Image: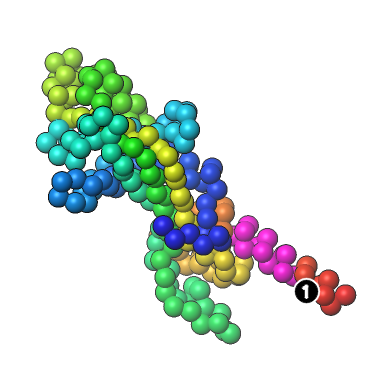
Amino acid sequence: MYVPAHFAMSAEQVAEVLATAPAGDLVTVGPDGLVATYVPMLFDADAGGHGRLIGHLSRVNDQWRPAAAPGGVDALFIAHGAGDYVEADWLSTPDAPSVPTWNYVTVQVWGRLVVHDDPAWMLEAVRRLSAAHGDATVDTLPTAEVDALLRAVVGVELQITRVAGKAKMSQNKSPQVVRSVIDGLRGAGGEDTAAWMEEYSLPRAQAKADLLAGIRERRQG
């Protein structure tokens, strides 16, 4: 993924996306080429190294089969954070007209995908994943129904080796432009993107503007 320095995300921002994204695209290579499944995965930051993502796939989804080999297979997981269309008028100034764009936050995770077919492992993974979304159904179902559900899925674990995050959120613009985009997004219903920009983009844009102003003052003085 191409990530200019001014769009790079901190480790904390990356972890937040992985911890809060409801689901993402799990991509692997199978006998017929690239395969992708949109699937919820739980980020476990305490698993050592870069952490891991755990979840499950339907047993009839053949994407898991190559990962059942010893050592698993290489895989990519793509999660998205806030994102919205940005109108040209929000970005334009009298001396610098602009074009529309799309602001977004995205995180890509690489690692080894391995399979877990142990009912105890799968039950714990399903319970933790459900709890992360505020659902305790698995603890209220009869044991026989839970066992039937577990037989229909296969546990998967992405052992993370590398992560990259990109936030293209107008933080390279002037503070007045960032404020204009935030106001425009709020008026159009893009509250999540506006909130992200207010927390991260606006302070960064202001810091850059203050730095440049200080440099100009020193040169003039």
**Percent x, y of residue 49:** 48, 33
Q: Is residue 188 visible?
A: no
Compared to residue 145, the image places residue 92 above or below, namely: below
> Residue 96 vs residue 185: left or right?
right
Please check the rendered image and state whether residue 203 is part of the magenta-colored stretch, yes or no.
yes
**Residue drawn at x 42%, y 70% as measured from the top left:** 101
Element carrying mark 1: helix
**Percent x, y of residue 48:** 47, 29
Compared to residue 216, the image places residue 67 above or below, namely: above
Q: Is residue 25 visible?
A: yes
> Residue 60 vs residue 154: left or right?
left
Q: Amino acid at mark 1?
A: Arg
Quadrant containing the C terminus in the rendered view: bottom right
Q: Which residue, given by chain and number where applicable, does mark 1 sit on?
A: 216
**Residue drawn at x 33%, y 46% as measured from the top left:** 76
**Percent x, y of residue 7:** 52, 59
Q: Which residues are magenta?
A: 202-213
**Residue drawn at x 21%, y 24% as measured from the top left:** 117
